[in-house]
Image: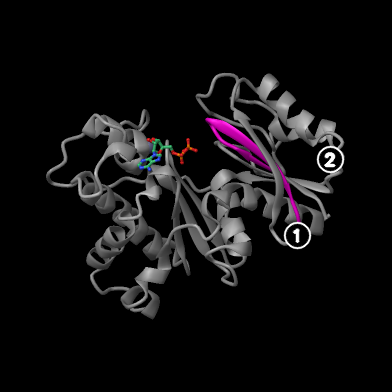
Amino acid sequence: MRIGAIEAGGTKFVCGIGNEEGVIEDRVSFPTENPESTMANVIAYFEGKGVEAIGIGTFGPIDIDKASPTYGHVTTTPKPGWSGFDFLGTMKRNFDVPFGWDTDVNAAAFGEATWGAAKGLDSCVYYTVGTGIGVGVYSEGKLVHGLVHPEGGHVLTRRHADDDYEGFCPYHGDCLEGMAAGPALEKRWKVKGSELAVDHPAWALEAYYLGQAVSNVILMLSPKKVILGGGVMHQLQLFPMIREEVRKQLNGYVSAKEIVSGLDSFIVPPGLGDNAGLSGSLALGLDALKGK
Ligand code: ADP
Ligand code: ZN
């Protein structure tokens, strides 16, 4: 079986082909430019490859309401040319196969639930902490969409007493993304996150904010696993610090053994590593084929 997968990011697109076991057999990557040239690359890649379905996990916000006239469109992104672009329709006009279509983070959550860190569980939450912060939610065996789709990167945070950084979110200033995504690290400390020493005070602050987000998501959605991915989470020293924050912030209120004594295996990096996004799109494609 050959399934196509597209991980559409704001910086780069990754396209690949994989099988029903989640094995990715081929992949290419190119920078995200305007929709016309980017889609020309996508279409050229899949042409003649004989894929039976294609899964798309994309940056957004996007319209995933099947009853909406703009289903399959990118909606309000500031990315030049992409706002209102009919992404799914463009693909459908070129390939007569079933399509899976969801946010990049919902795709990653689905991939992790299918083959990764949440395999065998009927719920998980996937965070990406990168250029922005996004949250994918898989609950009771289904991806959560609701009114639009979860936008948990923009939840409000309680500011740390010693932090006077104003936050960079153009909508909210000091929301979670504004305080803790990669650009916040860079703007606050005047150096890229990847260049900060592992014992730099930046990481305690980062863990404080991410710990709040994870504590809140545990309280709100009661997921069976919380997976933290994205560029910033390459700083693996954050994991024990975030677990400690969650322990402190929940303060014994949630009595499940996973929280009381199992946080090491409850708050984890993606089981699929940096393949979480592409594998997730593959899982969406496979699911579309099954539901055909
Ligand atoms: P994107 O969010 O654009 O898809 P990434 O998940 O790679 O891509 O996130 C990029 C952001 O993560 C940038 O702000 C970058 O500075 C930051 N970043 C990437 N690698 C690291 C690292 N090893 N440590 C800290 N920050 C990092
Ligand atoms: Zn925001």
Q: Quadrant of ligand 1?
A: top left
Q: Quadrant of residue 191?
A: top left
Is the residue 241 above or below the residue 84 in the image?
below
Q: Amino acid at mark 1?
A: Glu
Crowd class of label 1 (few under 14; some 14 to 19; many from 20; radius 10 Å): some
Range of magenta residues = 5-20
Helix, strand or loop under label 2: loop
Helix, strand or loop under label 1: loop
Q: From the top left corner, tell me how far across and down residue 110 is, in percent.
A: 60, 57
Closer to us: 21 or 92: 21
For label 2, the residue is 49
- Which of the two discs, 1 and 2, labels the residue nearer the N terminus? 1
For label 1, the residue is 20
- The colour scheme applied to this rendered structure is one colour
Residue 145 visible in the displayed image? no
Is the residue 84 above or below the residue 157 in the image?
above
Position of the N terminus by quadrant = bottom right
- Residue at 61 percent of width and 57 percent of height: 111
Q: Quadrant of residue 88?
A: top right
Residue 30 visible in the displayed image? yes
- Residue at 20 percent of width and 34 percent of height: 165
Q: From the top left corner, tell me how far across and down residue 92 is, in percent.
A: 81, 35
Could you give the CA–CA distance between mark 1 and mark 2, rounded to whole angstroms?
A: 16 Å
Is the residue 138 above or below the residue 74 in the image?
below
* 159 left or right of 265 in image: left
Is the residue 252 above or below the residue 53 in the image?
below
* 175 left or right of 279 in image: left
Q: Amino acid at mark 2?
A: Lys
- Residue at 87 percent of width and 39 percent of height: 96
